[in-house]
Amino acid sequence: MVRLKRPLLWACLIAIAALTTLSVYGAFLGADRAQAFFNSVPVAVFWGTFVALLAAGIVAFRRLLWVPSLLLMHLGCILVVLGGMWGSKPGQDFQERFLGTERISKGQMPILEGTAENRVAIADSNETKELPFSIRLRKFRIEYYEPGDLYIYSRDGGRWKLPAEAGRSQRLGRDLGMVTIQRVFRNFKMDVSGDERIAVDAPGGSNPALEVTIERPDGSTARRYVFLQRAGHNDPSDPLALTYTQSVRDYISELEVVRDNEVVASKDIEVNHPLYYGGYHFYQHKYGQNQFGDYTILMVVADSGLRIVYSGYAMLMVGIVWHFWGRPLRSALRNRRSNERDGNR
């Protein structure tokens, strides 16, 4: 056993160096290619070898059993790797084949606003699987940074930028007149209930728009509505083209989990703030519009192995803190008490 300690130590150091190199390499591959790379057979063999070396180190170096901080760090590393292997696509295929545990490793779920869906399109395949519950998209909305900007273009190449705030004006020169923003709408609607059509800022919904007046050099005034989401078409004979822009701040899907015709959970999800239910994370992935209305596309990811990984990280952090800070502090306190006892004698 003594003869094996040095080769084992060197093998562990080489494995750690290889892990560092693989991590740096994977950072430049992108998410999808990195996932395929780290789940490949050669790298899977490396993971298994790394775990075996760490486990062998605990057996060979008996001191680890008497130093809890070092033992926690080793066990934490083992759990992190094992949890990652258990939650990977090959790991979940193994669970399904030998343990009968059928899980959706990763997929996408498109949901139309106002409807519920339980079908998940499996990643990298044409297969579709169903969840034992449904996700309803109550509402999808986009939040923007305010105030936004109104861009004004002239036929001769002129360009002006105006903050999208009511009362803002921009003189365009003697031949083009002046543009003034009269109103800013969060949700533009045209009220046609009376004899006249009246533009209103309706509660709820999201249809940002600007009401703009153009005072021409001849004294006449024209009124336009410039929309954020639907740019429309400019009149070729008009000397000015107007565009309303806002930077997107967030995409939000208001979700409900429906099980046995009852809402059992709900959450407004956004990027990096998913809904978690039934062993799955539901991430905001994409969105769009079709002839039926707004829709969202959720990324569905199973949590298999995630708790093992989190437990490993917790053990690793506790071991590190205790080994580099807790043990020295305890030794210092012990020496201080010993010196105080010696001084009182």
Image (cartoon, rainbow, N blue to C red):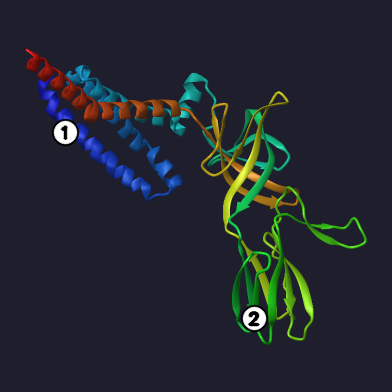
Amino acid type at mark 2 = Leu
In the rendered structure, the answer to whether residue 223 lies left or right of residue 279 reads: right
Residue 167 screen position, x and y as percent: 68, 68
Q: What is the x, y in percent for residue 88?
A: 44, 33
Q: Quadrant of residue 59?
A: top left
| In the depicted structure, whether residue 267 falls above or below residue 318 | below
Query: How many numbered discs?
Result: 2
Residue under circle 1?
Answer: 10
- Residue at x 28% of width, y 26% of height: 319
Left/right placement of residue 107 relative to residue 60 reads right
Tell me the SS state at disc 2.
strand
- Give the residue drawn at x 26%, y 23%: 55
Tag on residue 172?
2
The kind of residue on which mark 1 rests is Trp
Residue nearest the observer in this picture, 214 or 53: 214
Of 139 and 198, the residue lying toward us: 198
Please indicate, yes or no, whether residue 52 appears anywhere in the rendered image. Answer: no
Measured as percent of width and height from the top left, residue 92 is found at 47, 28
Q: Secondary structure at mark 1?
A: helix
- The quarter of the rendered structure image containing the N terminus is top left
Left or right: residue 154 versus residue 330 is: right
Residue visible at 16% across and 19% down in the picture: 334
Q: CA distance from mark 2 to mark 1?
A: 74 Å
| Residue lying at the far front of the rendered structure | 344
Name the spot of residue 227 as percent of width and height, x first: 70, 63
Crowd tier of the residue under label 2, counting other residues whose Cα lies within 10 Å: few below 14, some 14–19, many 20 or above: some
Point out the frontmost of discs 2 and 1.
Answer: 2
Q: Is residue 29 above or below residue 86?
A: below
Above or below — where is 299 with respect to 131? below
| First-in-chain label (2 vs 1) | 1
